[in-house]
């Protein structure tokens, strides 16, 4: 598979997961007392992407490197959205 095609899929996955995480925060409206659960969510996101990457690696699919990179990026995006939620939106609900 061409490198440009993998990059396009990577950008698509990045946009979709960012939108889904934003929707999750908007619907759930987490409170500051559940901040200790962030570590559990980060490990779940890391684990899901790592398992998908390993599965695709053993199936010899070219997307395996994409999921390995996403295993690092996805928890960081979640953490950034978490910080933004409590900095801007949780204090001033709409």
Image (tube, rainbow, N blue to C red):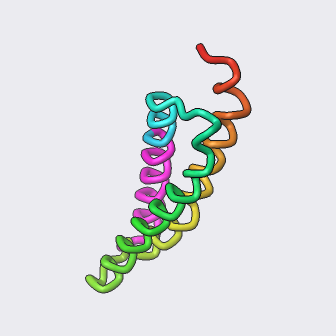
Task: Write down the quadrant of residue 83 in the picture.
Answer: top right
Nearer to the camera, 91 or 26? 91
The residue segment tinted magenta is: 1-19
How far from the left and from the top, in percent, is residue 57?
A: 35, 82
Residue closest to the far front: 33
Residue closest to the far top: 94
How far from the left and from the top, in percent, is residue 85?
A: 64, 34
- Horizontally, residue 63 falls left or right of residue 75, namely left
Nearer to the camera, 25 or 4? 25
Q: Point out the image quarter for the C terminus.
A: top right
Residue 50 painted magenta: no
Residue drawn at 44 percent across, 69 percent down: 47
Residue drawn at 43 percent across, 41 percent down: 20
Q: Point out the image quarter for the N terminus.
A: bottom left
Residue drawn at 47 percent across, 39 percent down: 19
How far from the left and from the top, in percent, is residue 22?
A: 51, 36
Nearer to the camera, 20 or 79? 79
User: What secondary structure is the magenta-colored segment mainly?
Assistant: helix
Residue drawn at 51 percent across, 35 percent down: 25
- Horizontally, residue 36 falls left or right of residue 64, namely right
Above or below residue 54? Residue 9 is above
Nearer to the camera, 31 or 13? 31
Residue 9 painted magenta: yes
How far from the left and from the top, in percent, is residue 23?
A: 45, 33
């Amino acid at each position: 598979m061409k490198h440009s095609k993998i990059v396009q899929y990577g950008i698509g996955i990045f946009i979709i997961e960012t939108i889904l995480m934003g929707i999750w925060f908007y619907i759930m409206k987490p409170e500051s007392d559940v901040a200790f659960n962030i570590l559990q969510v980060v490990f779940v996101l890391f684990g899901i992407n790592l398992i998908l990457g390993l599965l695709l690696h053993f199936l010899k699919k070219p997307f395996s490197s994409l999921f390995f990179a996403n295993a690092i990026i996805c928890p960081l995006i979640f953490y950034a959205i978490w910080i933004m939620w409590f900095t801007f939106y949780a204090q001033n609900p709409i």
